[in-house]
Image (cartoon, rainbow, N blue to C red):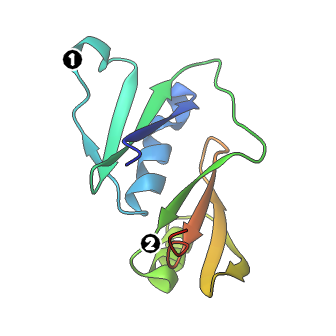
């Protein structure tokens, strides 16, 4: 199980980033007190996104997190209603997929279903 992924976000984009991930089913959870001033933790079903607050944030061009969403069309609609764009791309393994970009520029792949086990 992948427990968490950390992304760097400028402080001014933290709350918009939290809202973006909330639309993907993640909720804010408390970060440990010693680091709570410079990180925001989000969690969904035991997987966490650690939003690192930094003025020197970097964003990979193609690297991305991928999230299986419970309701593909509903998630795309919720993102659109929240002011975020998601662009559907080619289906793989018979499942629909889309890419969205969060407020700080991080790409996220949205999947209707995960790939079949190897």
**Residue 7 in the image: x percent, y percent?**
54, 34
Label 2 crowding class (10 Å Cα cut-off): few <14, some 14-19, many 20+?
some
Residue sitting nearer the eye, 78 or 73: 73
Q: Residue 69 got which mark? A: 2
Secondary structure at badge 1 equals: helix
Label 1 crowding class (10 Å Cα cut-off): few <14, some 14-19, many 20+?
few
**Residue 82 in the image: x percent, y percent?**
50, 65
Q: Is residue 105 left or right of residue 117?
A: right
Farthest residue to the top: give it: 34
- The vertical placement of 111 against 8, above or below, is below
Q: CA distance from mark 1 to mark 2?
A: 31 Å
Where residue 25 sits, quadrant-wise, is: bottom left
Asked whether the residues under the numbered discs 1 and 2 touch, taking CB atoms below 8 Å apart as contact, a structural biologist would say no
User: Which callout, 1 or 2, points at the residue further toward the start of the chain?
Assistant: 1
**Residue 43 in the image: x percent, y percent?**
31, 48
Where residue 50 sits, quadrant-wise, is: top left
Q: Is residue 31 left or right of residue 70?
A: left
Q: Is residue 100 left or right of residue 77?
A: right
Q: Which residue is pictured at 40% across the width and 39% down the height?
A: 4
Farthest residue to the right: give it: 61
Counting labels gives 2
Q: Which residue is pictured at 66% across the width and 65% down the height?
A: 99
Residue under pointer 1:
33
Q: Which residue is pictured at 45% across the width and 34% down the height?
A: 51
Q: Which residue is pictured at 23% across the width and 22% down the height?
A: 32
User: Foreground mark, 1 or 2?
Assistant: 2
The image quadrant where one finds the C terminus is bottom right
**Residue 116 in the image: x percent, y percent?**
52, 75
Q: Residue 92 got which mark? A: none
Where residue 71 sits, quadrant-wise, is: bottom left
Secondary structure at badge 2 equals: loop
């Amino acid at each position: 199980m992948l427990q968490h992924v950390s992304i760097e976000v400028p402080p001014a984009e933290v709350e918009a980033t939290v809202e973006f991930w909330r639309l993907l089913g993640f909720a804010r959870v408390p970060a440990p007190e010693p680091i709570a001033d410079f990180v925001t933790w989000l969690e969904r079903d035991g997987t966490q996104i650690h939003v690192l607050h930094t003025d020197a944030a970097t964003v990979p061009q193609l690297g991305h997190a991928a999230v299986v969403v419970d309701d593909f069309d509903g998630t795309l609609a919720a993102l659109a209603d929240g002011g975020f764009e998601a662009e559907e791309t080619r289906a793989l393994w018979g499942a629909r997929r889309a890419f969205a970009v969060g407020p700080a520029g991080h790409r996220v792949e949205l999947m209707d279903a995960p790939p079949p086990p190897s």
